[in-house]
Image (cartoon, coloured by chain):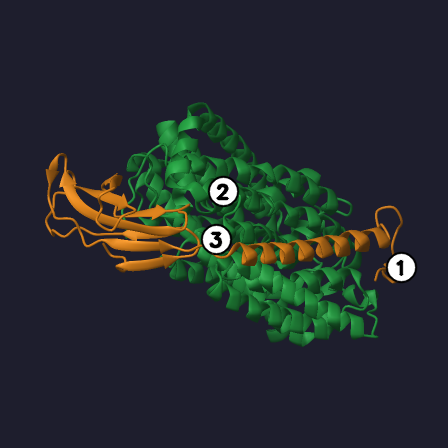
Chain colours: A orange, B green
Amino acid sequence: MDNDSVSLTSSGSIKLTWHSQAENRDTAIAAFELQRARKADFSDARTYYRGPDLATYISGLANGDYYFRIREVAGAQVLSDWSSPVKVTVEHHSLNLAFTLFGIGGVVFALTVMVVLRGARRTVDPDRKPVTSSRVEGG
Amino acid sequence: MEHQSAVLPASYGWVLLAILSVIWILLGMYWGRRAKSVEGFMLAGRNVGLALGTATAMATWVTSNTTMLAPQFAYELGIWGMIAYSTAAFGLLLFAPLAKRIRALMPKGFTSGDFIRLRYGKSTWHLFLVISIFYGFTWLISMGMAGGILLNALAGIPYEVGMSVILLVCVVYTLFGGLFAVIGTDYIQSLIILIGIVIVGAGVLSYADFDTSYTHLVDERPMLISVMLPAAIMAIFNNLLFGVGEIFHSNVWWSRAFAMRRGVGKKAYLLAGFFWLPVPIAAGFIALTSGALGINVTSPDMVGPLVAANVLGKIGAMVVFVVAFASLASSVDSLLAATSDLITEDIYRKLINPKASQETLRKASAYIIVGLGLAAWLVCLPRVGTLATVLFFAGPMVGACIWPIATGLFWKKANTRGALWGMLSGSVVGLFAYFELGWYTASLIGAAVSMVVVLIATAVSRHEFDWRRLDEKHPELEGRVESR
């Protein structure tokens, strides 16, 4: 696999990429088998993807460690050994930070709405009265 | 390049690409035949009505952002991500009163740059031009990339070819027809987008097994259905403020405000906002079914089109192809037109050649459109990142423009110091957040810092702005020129 052997993500998403080890592999029959496990020895491994693509984008992972490895296959035939495992550690941002930013965003948005709506209400409607530039009010 | 399995035979893709390219070029040239004067070319004669005004606002806002980025939000940030994306509609809704105010204050205005120059002076104007042109160019690149990625994933058309064709087609018809062509094609494109999304949405709803999808999410991607996903919680107001900042500052939206007939702008933007609101939820929802359907996603920005095309087969893939091409074209043409207007009016005419004739300006505008297309093409060639990371890089800068613009339109005491330092400090601190916390925080922090600076500067200011200074006349640009 092309990823670093240890990766850290704070969003719960990661892209895994890989490439074929053999130069002259018949791409029409070759495929890749990607396994995912929560244990480093892959005793609880499950097949995550099987097909010809050279990458996968994984999202929505909860906090914790995840292990991935890949090998080449052709039907039931195994064409390569398992790759070295890649360990992905998910450590989401703290909820305190998230809610703080959420609160700041809420305040900025509310004040922006207030500026626009109050401003629009306090200015002359040019569609009802013909407006000369000197009569456009505000502030 | 990571290989992504195509869902449509390449021959179908090539035929669709050829047909759509010819249609848009011919329609653009047909509508653009009325662009005789510079004002006609840049602002469609300032006479756009409610139907065309609503359609162009909605179609321009339905971009690769909606067909590709909204599903990406759902795929990466789950339920909250889907809702977060739909909040971008507030940009259109809040711009409605601004459009009316802009039309009243600047009946002869041309660009958002005109407003900043007249309201805040040269220093702020220069900074604004850097931000606005950078943003426009970033958006253009993300569209070009989206086109290449999409055509590649749907029909196996090489990324470089798909990206080049979309940029070329839009450059050609914008070149000939200016905003007339952009608004005319937007009208047809908005109809195609709405009909296409209804077809795809209905197809996915009838096909998807909700129980299986839910179980898959619980087992494999539990955070996508959690209301406590921190990145998603941060993204809600970040995306909302990014959308507001994009629309408040960008000449794409100001040029439409100038182009619409008096009394039309506010209604058109309100209607467009309400029409747009449900679109990203429909587009985003289908991304959550991807895992249960066994679809491998190599790039998160492709999840929406991939699910739709896989579920609905060849017909579905063709519908997605047409909708995506329409939504990309409707944004690329708008960006080319609005950014070239900004460069022509604010840089070429104001800074380089103030005595330029109408014909010279038309020529300059044409060269700028071609130059922009070429520059975007060169940057798009190496695929530099996902759509979100490319587009959101401009997030802190556009977020930092919200308060200088909103207060500049309504508060007499809003002043240069607040606007300049608000834009600058918001951009810098927001960019720091982009790298330190993630792209989903940058616009929010940029907007918040800028707001505080503007509020302080306004509070300590005694100066009051005279609104009449915004009503700048351009008699030399209002005549007619028979250059085509």
- Decide if residue B19 is on the left or right side of residue A135: left
Q: Secondary structure at mark 2?
A: loop
Q: Nearer the viewer, mark 3 or mark 1?
A: 1
Q: Residue furthest top?
A: B206
Q: Secondary structure at mark 3?
A: helix
The residue at the point 45 percent across, 44 percent down is B223
Q: Residues within 10 Å of mark 2 (few under 14, many from 20)?
A: some
Q: Label 3 is placed on what type of residue?
A: Val
Q: Nearer the viewer, mark 2 or mark 3?
A: 2
Judge if badges 2 and 3 mark residues of a common chain. Answer: yes
Q: Residue B31's x, y, as percent?
A: 58, 43
- Look at mark 2 in the image and give the residue it sits on: B226
- Circles 2, 3 touching at the beta carbon (< 8 Å): no
Parent chain of label 2: B
- Residue B61 got which mark? none
Q: Nearer the viewer, mark 2 or mark 1?
A: 2
Above or below, comparing residue A93 to residue B28 in the picture: below
- Look at mark 3 in the image and give the residue it sits on: B171
- Could you tell me how far apart the alpha carbons at marks 2 and 1 are, in whole angstroms? 53 Å
Parent chain of label 3: B
- Look at mark 1 in the image and give the residue it sits on: A135
Q: Label 1 is placed on what type of residue?
A: Arg
- Could you tell me how far apart the alpha carbons at marks 3 and 1 are, in whole angstroms? 42 Å
Q: Secondary structure at mark 1?
A: helix
The residue at the point 89 percent across, 49 percent down is A129
Q: Residues within 10 Å of mark 3 (few under 14, many from 20)?
A: many
Judge if badges 3 and 1 mark residues of a common chain. Answer: no
Q: Label 2 is placed on what type of residue?
A: Ser
Q: Residues within 10 Å of mark 1 (few under 14, many from 20)?
A: some
Q: Residue B79's x, y, as percent?
A: 51, 41
Q: Residue B393's x, y, as percent?
A: 49, 61
Pointer 2 or 3: first along the chain: 3
